Image: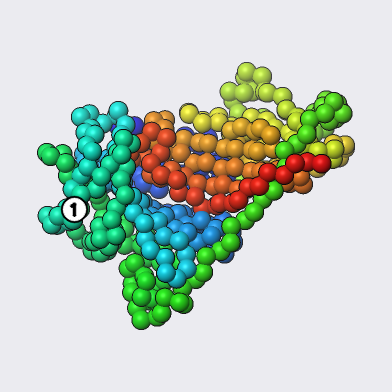
Amino acid sequence: MQSCKKTSQAMHRKTAIKHAVCAVLLLPGMAYAATGTNINSGKGIHFSHQDWEVACDNTRTCRAAGYQADDSDSFPVSVLFTRKAGAGQNVDGQLKLGSTDYVDGQPTPQSVHLFINSTSYGTVGLDSGLSGTLSALQIQALIAALAGHSVIQFKSGQDTWNLSGQGAAAVFLKMDDVQGRIDTTSALLRKGKKPEASVLPALPMTVVNWVKPVESSALKRLTKSVDLIQLKQEILAQTPKTDDHYCPVIWGEDVYTTANNEPALDIQPLSSHKLLASNLCWRGAYNEGYGYWVINTQKPYQPKLVTSGASDYADGVISGAQKGRGLGDCWSHEEWVWNGQQFIQTDESTTGMCRLVELGGAWDLPTRVAIVKKQVKK
């Protein structure tokens, strides 16, 4: 099975892989990993411990996912619990069995039985993607079992999927903390006598007006009139050599691109006052990141970095998609939308840990969400 270790290039990126779904699994001696712990900052949080993780987005909706033990030979399996913030919000639960071709003899049942400490809690029907919805009774039983030391299995005939409980308690506690449920009657783990009405409310989702840049011959002429030598000098002066601005290609420190001719800056129109400059910033074993800068149409260009870990740009949307490892069973995603004046980040998410559950990733675990409305540029 392929390692989850990242390349040295990837370790220096900003947010495209900062949740780095594999990195938190295999570093020796690491008890847990958490990022973006201030939910009120609008950035959400991601926390992982052993075989469990939780991602809470900027609305305080939290999604906790657990997997088979990383050091076991069990068939890949994952359970996802989702809970919105605020009083009166139940926990939804989903099950997903492994469906990759990398596990020998992996079965494809139509349903499985849930057993907790050898006691049956009924069946879970599965769709063609080996996903199923857990009942309210099953969710309640699983949460109670995961808070302690229990053997949790999903069975079909002679086949068994073992769900690890290692790390679940810490993840549930973090989830309750973000939603203000600790010591309340609705807490998952540390219940108390405080009324549920005292929990934190859901935060409103950010609304971003997406302005699609209008192409014209005049704007195209502006892109061709940019002094690329001066622009690069300004980018070098205003892009410090830090992990948050990682761009060795621009700095002339990338051996591969230096030896094979450094790619030129690409310029695209945004408006009559702003342009978008881009350039390859780094390459890893199976990822690469492009830097995007918003610049003035005239000198001085005053470049402002949007990201150095993007993958693509089209119609006013910068997007990033990075593998957690070469197999492609875990990814991180980001998106920035042009609102006519600047790029606003509208998505930041991972697909969960690298556990061979599904190619492309098992889940959508966002820490930043937004409503994007298309606005016609007048």
Question: Quadrant location of residue 359?
Answer: top left
Give coordinates of residue 258: x percent, y percent.
Answer: 64, 23
**Is residue 110 at all visible to an observer of this figure?**
yes
Quarter that holds the N terminus: top left
User: Residue 352, percent across and down?
Assistant: 40, 45
Quarter of the picture holding the C terminus: top right
| Location of mark 1 (residue) | 122
| Left/right of residue 322 with respect to residue 147 in the rendered view | right
* Residue shown at the point (59%, 42%) measured from the top left: 335
Figure disc tally? 1
> What is the quadrant of residue 117 in the picture?
bottom left
182 left or right of 315 in image: left
Extreme residue in the bottom direction? 193
Identify the secondary structure beneath mark 1. Answer: strand
Looking at this view, name the residue that lies furthest to the top: 260
Q: Is residue 301 visible?
A: no
Q: Amino acid at mark 1?
A: Gly
Q: Where is residue 255 drawn, in percent x and y?
A: 59, 25
| Badge 1 density bin: few <14, some 14–19, many ≥20, Cα 10 Å | some
Q: Is residue 241 above or below residue 119?
A: above
